[in-house]
Image (spheres, rainbow, N blue to C red):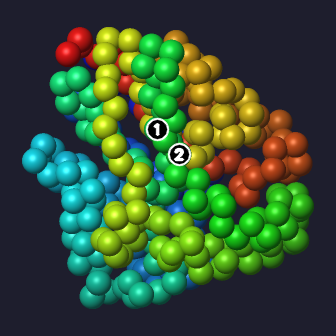
Amino acid sequence: MRVLAASDPGSSDRANEDWFYADEHLVAVLDGATARTDTGCLHGVSWYARRLGETSIELVRDPSTSLSNALAIAISRVADEHRSTCDLGHPGTPSAGVGLVRFQPGGLDYLVLGDVSLAVDQGGRLTVITDDRVSRTAAAERAEADRHPIGSPGKAAALLAMKHAELAARNVPGGYWIAEADPAVVQQALTGFIPVDAQTRVAVLSDGAARAVTLGLLDWPNTLDLLGAQGPTALIARVRQAERQDPSAIRWRRNKQSDDATAIYVDGFSPS
């Protein structure tokens, strides 16, 4: 079994708000949500993503604990870690998208909550699990932000308005769901079981790495091909090259020139 992973911050002057873990049993990618407003938290998004990831991995090692229950307990434990110092009821309290995969003989269990993507190719039969609810919120504000080039005053103002609209839709019916302080959000996660065999290929990507697909650079089969042939670092490099070619986000509309990018690729499963 081959497990390859890489993560790259979107900016050299900011901490990576992605967090990942990968071995032959478990894969986790957490994508901390960009804070454009006050958060009411002393620790920040990177800390939250790391602590939620570390705590989740401890819990999902127990095969008798479902991924949903593990994440719910992890959310509660991390909330307890900073409840006394931080305002967990603040509208901007740190949050993170979560992708969890647990391998077992003959298959994998998965959980996706927020903007993390899971792609599974079973010998040419492709399954992509993407929680796109966040990208469907604040549609008018998102379109307004897309009108402006990165670095312009209009872009900054539009992004702030978009963030306020997103926060108003966070973890409410009709909006989108993401891990923050309330463990009940796990009820909205996308979960399931997918069989695997010797031909299966698996990728888990944060949305910064999934730009390879969302910007139209590659389709999902070609993304898996690149991951298998050259590894996650090459995929992230492909995204970074496109971002450098379009620094103002005119050709490829986006909120940040470069986003934190994490990619994990797994293949070489033993026959069940």
CB under 8 Å between discs 2 and 1: yes
Q: Is residue 110 above or below residue 121?
A: below
Report the residue marked by disc 1.
Answer: 118
Instruction: Tell me the quarter of the picture where residue 239 sits.
Output: top right
Residue 136, image x, y percentages = 66, 61
Task: Inspect this view and state whether residue 218 appears.
Answer: yes
| Left or right position of 206 against 250 | left
Residue 117, image x, y percentages = 50, 42
- Give the CA distance from mark 2 to mark 1: 6 Å
Q: Is residue 102 above or below residue 171?
A: above
Under circle 2, the secondary element is: strand
Query: What number is the disc on residue 130?
Result: 2
Residue toward you, 13 or 233: 233
Instruction: Tell me the quarter of the picture where residue 23 sits.
Output: top left
Residue located at (31% from left, 16% from top)? 197
Under circle 1, the secondary element is: strand
| Left or right position of 58 against 8 | left
